[in-house]
Amino acid sequence: MRLRLNGIRKSFGATRALKGVSLSVTAGAGLAVIGENGAGKSTLMKVLSGAHAPDEGTMELDGERYAPEDPLEARRRGVAMIYQELNLVPHLSVEANIVLGVEPSRWGLLDRRKRREEARKALADLHSGIDPAAPVSALTIAQQQLVEIARALVHEPKVLILDEPTSSLTGVDVEHLYQVLDRLRARGVSVLYISHFLEECQRVCSDYVVLRDGESVGAGRLAGIAMRDIIHMMVGREVTELYPRTPHTIGKPILELRNLAGERKPRSMTCTVREGEIFGMFGLIGAGRTETLRAMFGLDPVSGGTVSLNGVEVTGWTPTRLLGCGVSLLSEDRKQEGLLLNRSIAENLLLTRPSPISRGGFIRLGAERRMALDWMERLEVKAQSAEQSIGELSGGNQQKVAFGRLLYHQARLLLLDEPTRGIDVGSKASIYRRIGRAAEQGRTVVLVSSYIPELLGVCDTVAVCCRGEIVAVKPVSEWTEQDLVSAAIGQGTESGLEGKES
Amino acid sequence: MANEDMGGIKAQLRRWVQVGGPFLGLVLVCLFFAFARDEFGEPARESIFKAGNLKIVLVQTVVVGIGALGMTLVIVSGGIDLSAGSMVAFCSVLGARMIVGGSSPGVVVAVAVLAGAGIGLINGGAIAAFRLLPFIVTLGSMSIVRGAGKWLGKNQATSIPNDSGIAMVMKVTSPETLFPLPHGVWIMLALAAITAVGLRQSIFGRHIVAVGSNESTARLCGVRVRSVKVAVYALAGLFFGIAGVMQLARLTQGDPTVAVGLELDIIAAVVIGGASLSGGSGSILGAIVGALLMALLRNGTSQLGWANYVQEIIIGSVIVLAVGLDKWRQGRGRV
């Protein structure tokens, strides 16, 4: 047995984050660690990587006691962790990043030749074709992730832990990552794979362990187990319909883009969205979907083409003006753009529409709190109070608030950019229900997503973007997963991974 | 993941520290002076906590306190204004020249305050229009406005009569009792109350906070970010103008070389009051308490007969302590 955990417990003050986790993985095997947000996955990973010491329980690595004092010792023992957020120094070169903290030296000076050698060796394992001398800032996200993995490989890892590694990757890059993991496993590296995407777990792993409320509630072989059983274990209840279809009627055209172009992206976007429609936009990262939404919403400059809303041209209008017309946007990046992280839930939720809770330009604090609590209940936000700072909530709850802001705004046109990225199944289902209900009320939704099942499950129409243009628009019934991917890749000649230098 | 739950007690504590921190500091300073003995071995509390002396402390708080109101707005919006001290000096010189020139007090106040607002408007305009760093812009205007003040005052102090209307605002009558307080103290408290409610409850105040907390989010949510910034610096200039008038009233002269480094005292008061220099949080009440705390420290240590440099070291330490507390309060919550 490569790694064995027995009865791991960990408390923070009064909160018991882990209440007894046991798992084991053999050399060269893949173990999927599955659980909702808040189930204790991150704490478990921190225990494994030496960031936290467990209160109780034992860990064994290759039959020996494993109790790392700190992350560096964990790495030396051969347990490497790839975090969801990349930890690279953008201005340094690839090779400098790979050996960061363990630089080879001679007489106290950096041994540049050895450094290059080590870095090349680690990169070669990945078949990446990344230039070791290039600055990390010049790489794509997918390439940066490979650099992170290369960094882990310098230490000849025995166990590689990946936390949501595909959350910022698209189809081709994901496939490349799988192949890298396959090769590592063939060399005897055990992989612990954390993901909300159960399909991914099945691709990468042979076994699973399910965490719920800090306990391991189920484990076994992935082969032969039904998805709904796993979901049942995760949530402790049946999620009967992940993609509920709410009947809704589609009306007249409401939003029209004519050759919309931004300064770099998009190049030329043309499409028509009808009232009450759920309009999906698929594409690889870099296809210009986010940029299209931003240009439409006045966040980025428009360099050509037009946007019309109900027949009125609104090209280049400010967000303030568009919000006044009932258009609202959910940012893909809730930490950097979506939320005021150090402010309260109430402020975040109610910021765009003060009129129902204010009089004469002043907020009525009581009305504000009541309104916020009412919406938090409707949105199923778990929090201590309406005054709690939103940065303290879990990702899923943060996203419910960010999305709830659009609903509270009574937006007629909702521009949603990756609304379910990195959140747990329960929160996802809640957001899908909300999207369905919005359409039922005759509101229009533009849904940008890189997650095909959700696009096929939720949308009426799906458009595929490729290199800054819309290359295909079809009703959802006419799309298959394969068609979407091949349309997004264009002619299938260019691999997104190697990256086009831009 | 566990952090979200573990927040409970600690988050409560952190919030309490933010609100109560400045008061706690003030209580500690008071306790210290309650037990300190001066150079002759006499308990200092009798001289420091005498009603008349407390009145002086309050009067010494006014200029920094009013300046701190404006600075809180700026800092909460994510900016900084280094030209505060120069503006106070400039407006006091302007006021003095006008009084000497025979203008009525009302006109003098109006012009001096509007001059401050005008300078702030220019600061804010440059920051918003050209997306310049507030630090750089106001560093420039700090020097420009200081120079302009010296030019206006012909490089010397302009004295005004002791009994002019302006001087009465800060005049200490009946030096043995706490009341009546000079008008200036009441003006500071009234302005603080208005600003506190405005920042907390007005839609404009919420927009200032949003811009400071996360400019991108503010923009996404339809806040007119540039207008808010311009307005914030103009408002701050207005407060610095008022502080300049108070300075003039207290010294009964407009001296273009006073209030050098005052902006740092003001910033310190705001930070001690619980504001975060990265924007998005701050407290008007805290800033006033911070200003009071610093005035009390200055006054008390000089009553003890301590040298000036000791005061400086203590005040510096208090600032670092306050910032460290702030870091602790918000840093760990979002690892």
Image (cartoon, coloured by chain):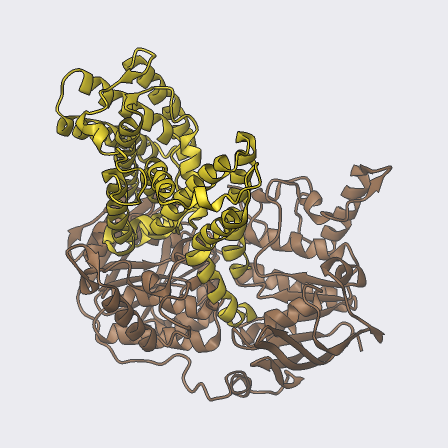
Q: Residue at x 49, y 34 (%)?
A: B302
- Residue A233 position, x and y percent, is 55, 86
Q: Residue furthest top?
A: B154
Residue A29 at least partly seen: yes
Q: How many marks?
A: 0
Nearer to the camera, B49 or A260: B49
Against A108, residue B16 (above or below) is below
Q: Nearer the viewer, residue A360 or B157?
A: B157
Instruction: Find residue B149 and report its horizontal and vertical position in percent.
Output: 31, 18
Residue B238 located left or right of residue A112: left
Q: Which chain is brown?
A: A
Q: Is residue A440 above or below residue A121?
A: below
Q: Nearer the viewer, residue B205 or A186?
A: B205
- In x, y percent, where is residue B217? 36, 53
In this orientation, does residue A294 appear? Answer: no
Q: Colour of chain B?
A: yellow
Q: Residue at x 67, y 48 (%)?
A: A129
- Quadrant where the image shows the N terminus of chain B: bottom right
Side of B236 where A7 appears, left or right: right
On screen, residue A438 versus residue A52, left or right, reads left
Occupied quadrant, residue A154: bottom right
Q: Residue furthest right?
A: A107
Residue A373 picture location, percent across and down = 31, 73
Q: Is residue A125 above or below residue B80?
A: below
- Quadrant that contains the C terminus of chain B: bottom right
Q: Is residue A236 left or right of residue A372?
A: right
Q: Residue at x 64, y 65 (%)?
A: A162
Residue at 22% in and 20% down: B161
Q: Residue A82: which quarter of the image?
A: bottom right
